[in-house]
Image (spheres, grey):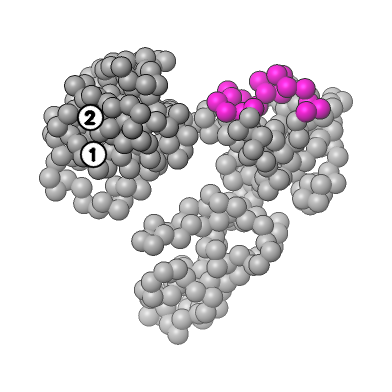
Amino acid sequence: MKGIILTEDELRAALVNTLQTVTLPDAKAWDKIKVGTILFVKEAWAGVHPLAIQQGRYSQIGGGGIPGPPPVDYRVVYRIDGPTLKVWSNQGGGWPYWSLTPPPHCYCGGDCRRQSACSDHHLDDGKRLFWYPARECPERVARLFLRIEALDGRIATVSVIHRRNLSPGFADQLAAGTAGYQQLIERVPASQIEPRDVAWVVLNAAKDHERAGVYIASRASIPERAAEWRRLRDVDGHHIVTSWIDEAGPGQTANFAELWLRIEREIAGAERLVLYAEAGDFPLKGAIAEAALAIANRIPVIIVAPGVKVEVPAYGPFGSWAAHPLVSFADSMAAALSTPPAAVRVPS
């Protein structure tokens, strides 16, 4: 999806839904824009601690955070909405790690009232906030979208879509598995689609487009498994995104909290998860958690279980979670890794 940078006046008009036209950039890359195209609006933004957000100010998920435990999820705010509240480190006081009250001194031991000794702990100014410029705004943090309703040369008549008005129920009916919003627009008359529904489809289709590679979940305590997955990646050339296979030996993982945060990111970016288990592997532990992360991210799970008798309808020994519509079974790793995978919903 293309992003567009608006003038300050245009952006303020879009925020109150009074923006009617925009001038498209005079560049060849924009020549293919047509009626029905949706653009995301690029704004200056920052990821901030929730304490820094004024009551009633719009914010949304996606700004990073503190892993904890317990974690704190930062939220995205936008520069045009004005400054945020000042926050200071609570200097080791535990969750939520930052405070609205300045500490009596800062970590550096210097006097931050007179010098820039601490980049993050200025007693007068609070934590320094880094604003990303509009040109560095990715669509995942955009809150405004413009649908092209008419074109007159480079002048586009637009309707404004705000992320807060999206209706996920619509996507459950029309957008599940869509390859992109344009196919939906072509398939369903525009009169039947609310702008907020189209935007929901756009966002979720974009997530699907960004996914690539296969994540493999299995018993990490069996060295031969990790070695086989490395062979599939390094020798056979399969796009395996699993990184735990490079540190599966005893004592090779220095920080398990960091490992699971990495696992979460790898699964969220994969286009499928393959869970491998043999008869002697049960009960499974981490592999079940990895499959749950995949399902939560709407990523297909393919189970390869040679020699394991799966008992339908309870799906033992895996458990009833394997009845989820995103879960299927393949006879071999080759079948699970093929494109498309050779898998069936109910095991034979």
Graded by Cα atoms within 10 Å as few (under 14), some (14 to 19) or many (20 or more), the crowding at tag 1 reads some
Q: Position of residue 224 (x, y in %)?
A: 13, 29
Left or right: where 138 falls relative to 116: right
Q: Which residue is mark 2?
A: 277
How many numbered discs sit on the rendered protein? 2
Which percent across, then down, holds residue 158?
A: 81, 35
Q: Which residues are magenta?
A: 174-192
Could you tell me which secondary element the residue under label 1 belongs to?
loop
Location of residue 155 by image quarter? top right
Q: Would residue 254 be found to the left or right of residue 265 on screen?
A: left
Image quadrant in which you'd find residue 301: top left
**Residue at image coords 16%, 45%:** 252
Q: What residue is drawn where x is 84% and y is 26%?
A: 151
Q: What is the secondary structure assignment of the residue under circle 2?
A: loop
Instruction: Name the disc covering residue 59, or none.
Output: none
Mark 2 vs mark 1: which is more N-terminal? 2
**Residue 22: x percent and y percent?**
81, 37
Give the side of residue 269 with respect to residue 262, left or right. right
What residue does disc 1 label?
284
Residue at coordinates 54% horizontally, 75% vertically from top-left?
100
